[in-house]
Structure formats: structure tokens, C-alpha cells
Amino acid sequence: MLKHPFLDVPYAPKLRHLLGPFDIYDREETLGEEFSRYDINLDTDRRRLIKKHIIEKSSDLSYRHRKVLCDKLEAALSDETFDFSHLLRQAPGYYCT
């Protein structure tokens, strides 16, 4: 069983974890400006963002953790009924966007 990288509990990947690198709270002038140069509606731009900010920058996760997380993403992308919009909604009172 794969354990959480920082806790002694089973690892349960969530798609929301993939969005962490895109949180620009208090980094609007750096990361926010970088992201504004991309069009997320273009496959090529999405690939660049995913590679740079998810695949290459997830060094706190082992390759096994990244694999399980990517498998979860693949399953969601393969499901035509999966609603990704809930991942992008901001919870009331939550400072991250």
C-alpha cells in the first residue's frame, strides 16, 4: 500500500492536488503574470503548463505518488461525464484561488 509522503496514512490522491502549483495567491505579480501569457483553451499551452508546473515541479512526490495522481487524472479525463468545474470553485472564506 502506498503511504502519504508526509504522514503515516494511505495515500489518497485528489485531483485538486494537481492545481496547487497554479495557486497565485500572493504571487499575482510573478506567477499570475506568467500564467496570463497562456491560453488554457489551447492544447499546446495546457501541455506546457502541465509539464512545467505539475510534472517537473512535483519533486515533493515520489514517482509512485505522481503516477497514482496521473492515473486519477487520466480516469477523469476519460470519463466524458466528469465535471471538472467543482475543482475550480473557490470555497467561501478560503484564501486560495
Image (cartoon, rainbow, N blue to C red):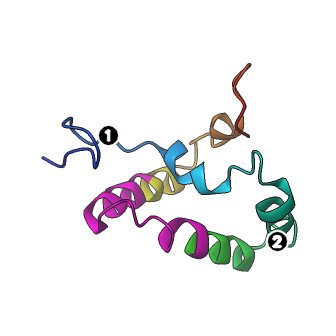
| Residue under the image location 50 percent in, 47 percent down | 17
Q: Helix or strand or loop: what does disc 1 sit on? A: loop
Residue 27 falls within the magenta-colored stretch: no
Question: Which residue is at the front of the view, 23 or 15?
Answer: 23
Q: Residue at x 69, y 26 (%)?
A: 94
Viewed as shown, does residue 46 lie left or right of 63? right
Cβ atoms at labels 1 and 2 below 8 Å apart: no
In the image, what residue type sits under mark 2? Tyr
Look at label 1 and name its amino acid.
Ala
Percent from the top left, x then y, of residue 46?
69, 70
Q: Which residues are magenta?
A: 52-72
Residue at mark 1: 12
Question: Percent x, y for residue 2?
Answer: 18, 49
Residue at the disc numbered 2:
38
Q: Earlier in the sequence, mark 1 or mark 2?
A: 1
Kindly identify the residue that appears in the image at 28 percent across and 49 percent down.
Answer: 5
User: Under tag 2, what secondary structure?
Assistant: loop
Q: Is residue 96 left or right of residue 78?
A: right
Q: Main secondary structure of the magenta part?
A: helix
Q: Nearer the viewer, residue 9 or 70?
A: 9
